[in-house]
Image: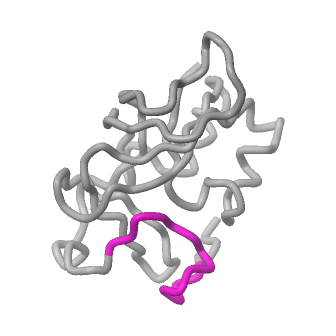
Amino acid sequence: MALLFMYGSLKKGQPNYFRMEDPENGQAEFLAYARTVKKYPLVIGTEFNIPFLLYEPGKGQRVQGEIYRVDQKMLDVLDKLEECPALFNRIKIQLEVQDVAGEGENKLKPGSIEEIDVYVKTTYELDWLQKPTYESYDTNGDHGLKYKDFT
């Protein structure tokens, strides 16, 4: 089982969340809401309006998202969806845990700092750093850049 931080189209209520719920893809268990310890630019790019977390620690905003525990099958499905490592890289970053789901010995603790995998963009056009950054992604946000399915 792996822990993943979702900040974009795979969060609850977003266009690709159905993939997380599909048992054919494996298992994904929501654990907690969290935000990045460091600032990162969360931008919306390409003609498909895809949310990208650019690997530029210290720039942008403290990004909010969700932590999931996923099995290997789900991890493989998500790696394929995210075109990892061609389009995105999966790396560990520090997150501050906020609200958690349930209690138990395997649960995260509010306020704790955890190193958890996240899909980030390490190579991109330089002008992407000039794009507006977001603290939290929502396809229906006031940015007017609705996600377009490309699969």
- Quadrant in which the C terminus is drawn: bottom right
Residue plotted at (67% across, 59% down): 16
Residue plotted at (56% across, 45% down): 66
Residue nearest the viewer, comparing 25 with 109: 109
Residue 123, located in which quarter of the rendered image?
A: bottom left
**Can you say whether 80 is above or below 2 in the image?**
below
- Please state the horizontal and vertical placement of residue 81, each as a whole percent of the image: 57, 51
Residue 18, located in which quarter of the rendered image?
A: bottom right
Residue 19 is covered by the magenta coloring? no
- Please state the horizontal and vertical placement of residue 146, each as a whole percent of the image: 59, 82
- Please state the horizontal and vertical placement of residue 10, each as a whole percent of the image: 61, 54
| Boundaries of the magenta span | 133-146
Residue nearest the viewer, comparing 65 with 71: 65
Residue 129, located in which quarter of the rendered image?
A: bottom left
Toward the front, the furthest residue is: 111
Residue plotted at (60% across, 71% down): 150
Residue nearest the viewer, comparing 29 with 46: 29
- Quadrant in which the N terminus is drawn: top right
